[in-house]
């Protein structure tokens, strides 16, 4: 457990070589704890989110165990919720397993079944799969799982959220009981606890703290009815002590109109949207950096490359479409060891917003703080924006509360 370097693990030299080539000097906490246990063949229940190095924590023990043994026989199966994650894991196997002669293949929907069938026929050692397509292969008998001796379920909580539980149960029926199982999850809701009890044998539980980069940022959501989003944004800006503020909207049009509104309200504001010429874009960016503007309104695409160390607040006027975009957006604050706030205005009435918040919380491994502006009338029937009126409220004093989410 107390390993300070990868050399202290019982890993094969060909793996150590690739670890060094990848520039991994010190094992991350999840690696320090999980690798020695997994190498002994024991089952592992890992509570860890993305960004903790959990992929290498299971990839290295798998490679190490498969090095000795026949090639071209499917001996390790990794199940992940999304194609993107499957690809990432596959990449990690390719990099770390370079000198081992072991082959990995991804299996997920949306691409031709035939290519996957051909690869499986040629013989692979490791499969990284999403549940739906894997089940298709099992049902069509184009994949044989009889030799699988290591099973990994990655981001189990997300797979549950996506409704993959029946598929996973089905898949597990096709895998020999005599095996090692490693299950990773950012959270441990009752459904997963039940599953772990049935599929893990005497597991060693490993839990790690959240990753560093996220700690510098305070994440919070501000629930409000859709027609009051703009009013709430104005109230937030009014009541919060900020340096530079970066506001994200879903569309170019919204970025522009918010910019116009904020300028009318007297803010030194600019917007970045795809329609701008390169010269105007650069002028807006420079103005944000040199303090001409305090607020920048942008879309995801237009905001690429903004790296401003003084951004104190990222405000999601509209939530992004993916958790990756959320991490990306909010990573713009809290840079260079400054602290920052990431605020999201969300509409509990909209199922898209509710779903995205849940996904973000899973990704981060903890619930987002829910805040209410004290001096804001959440029950008003009409937005005050058209009238141009805006009542000044007292200083922040945001308070917590969570009335709308059933956990
Ligand atoms: P993961 O949580 O598995 O998605 O890994 C997050 C990132 O950390 C990936 O880009 C890995 O390549 C990287 N990483 C994993 N382990 C280490 C390590 N021991 N040292 C440095 N970087 C690492």
Image: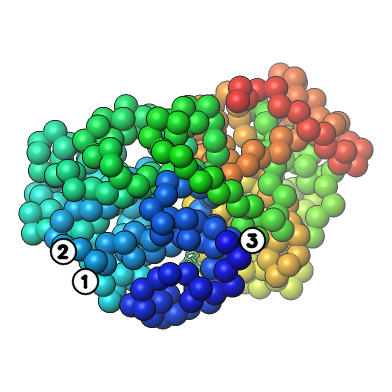
Answer yes or no: is residue 230 visible: no
- Residue found at the far right of this picture: 394
Q: Nearer the viewer, mark 1 or mark 3?
A: 1
In the rendered image, residue 150, in percent from the top left (x then y), is placed at 31, 50
Quadrant holding the C terminus: top right
Query: Which is more toward the observer, 25 or 314?
Result: 25
Residue ID at (75%, 35%): 371
Beta carbon at label 1 within 8 Å of ligand 1: no
Answer yes or no: is residue 308 visible: yes
In the rendered image, residue 54, in percent from the top left (x then y), is placed at 48, 56
Question: Which residue does the numbered mark 3 point to in the structure image?
Answer: 213
Q: Mark 3 Cα within 10 Å, few/some/many (few <14, many 20+)? A: few
Element at label 2: loop
Question: Left or right: where does residue 50 sit relative to residue 16?
Answer: right
Give yes or no for contact between labels 1 and 2 (Cβ–Cβ under 8 Å): yes
Beta carbon at label 3 within 8 Å of ligand 1: no
Element at label 1: loop
Query: Which is more toward the observer, 245 or 352?
Result: 352
Question: Which residue does the numbered mark 1 point to in the structure image?
Answer: 101
Query: Of the residues under marks 1 and 2, which one precedes in the sequence?
Result: 2
Q: Tell me the tag on residue 71.
A: 2
In the rendered image, residue 105, in percent from the top left (x then y), is placed at 22, 57
Query: Which is more toward the observer, 359 or 350?
Result: 359
Residue ID at (47%, 69%): 9
In the rendered image, residue 61, in percent from the top left (x then y), is placed at 38, 61
Question: Left or right: where does residue 310 sit relative to residue 151?
Answer: right
Location of residue 10 by image quarter? bottom left
How far, Cα to Cα, is label 1 from label 3?
35 Å
């Amino acid at each position: 457990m107390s390993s300070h370097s990868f050399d202290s693990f019982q890993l094969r030299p060909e793996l150590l070589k690739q670890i060094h080539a990848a520039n991994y000097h010190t094992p991350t906490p999840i690696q320090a704890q999980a690798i020695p246990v997994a190498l002994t063949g024991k089952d592992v229940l890992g509570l860890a989110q993305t960004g903790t190095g959990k992929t290498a924590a299971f990839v290295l023990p798998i490679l190490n165990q498969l090095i000795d043994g026949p090639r071209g026989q499917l001996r390790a199966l990794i199940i992940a919720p999304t194609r993107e994650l499957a690809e990432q894991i596959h990449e990690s196997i390719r990099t770390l397993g370079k000198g081992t002669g072991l082959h990995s293949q991804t299996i997920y929907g949306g691409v031709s079944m035939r290519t996957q069938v051909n690869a499986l026929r040629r013989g692979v050692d490791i499969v990284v799969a999403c549940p739906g397509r894997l089940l298709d292969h099992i049902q069509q008998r184009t994949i044989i799982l009889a030799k699988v001796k290591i099973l990994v379920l990655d981001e189990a909580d997300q797979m549950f959220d996506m409704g993959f539980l029946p598929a996973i149960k089905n898949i597990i029926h096709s895998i020999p009981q005599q095996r090692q199982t490693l299950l990773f999850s950012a959270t441990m809701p009752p459904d997963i606890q039940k599953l772990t009890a049935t599929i893990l044998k005497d597991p060693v539980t490993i839990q790690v703290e959240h990753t560093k980069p996220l700690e510098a940022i305070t994440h919070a959501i501000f629930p409000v009815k859709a027609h009051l989003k703009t009013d709430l944004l104005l109230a937030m800006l009014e009541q919060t002590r900020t340096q530079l503020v970066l506001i994200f909207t879903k569309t170019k049009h919204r970025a522009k109109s918010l910019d116009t509104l904020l300028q009318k309200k007297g803010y030194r504001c600019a917007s970045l949207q795809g329609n701008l010429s390169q010269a105007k874009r650069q002028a807006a960016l420079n103005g944000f950096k040199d303090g001409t503007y305090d607020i920048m309104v942008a879309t995801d695409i237009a905001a690429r490359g903004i790296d401003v160390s003084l951004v104190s607040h990222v405000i999601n006027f509209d939530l992004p479409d993916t958790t990756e975009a959320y991490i990306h957006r909010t990573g713009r604050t809290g840079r260079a060891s400054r602290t920052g706030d990431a605020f999201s205005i969300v509409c509990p009435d909209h199922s898209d917003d509710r779903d995205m918040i849940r996904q973000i919380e899973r990704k981060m491994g903890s619930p987002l703080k829910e805040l209410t502006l004290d001096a804001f009338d959440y029950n008003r029937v009409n937005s005050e924006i058209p009238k141009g009126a805006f009542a000044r409220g007292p200083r922040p004093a945001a308070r917590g509360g969570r009335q709308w989410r059933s956990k």
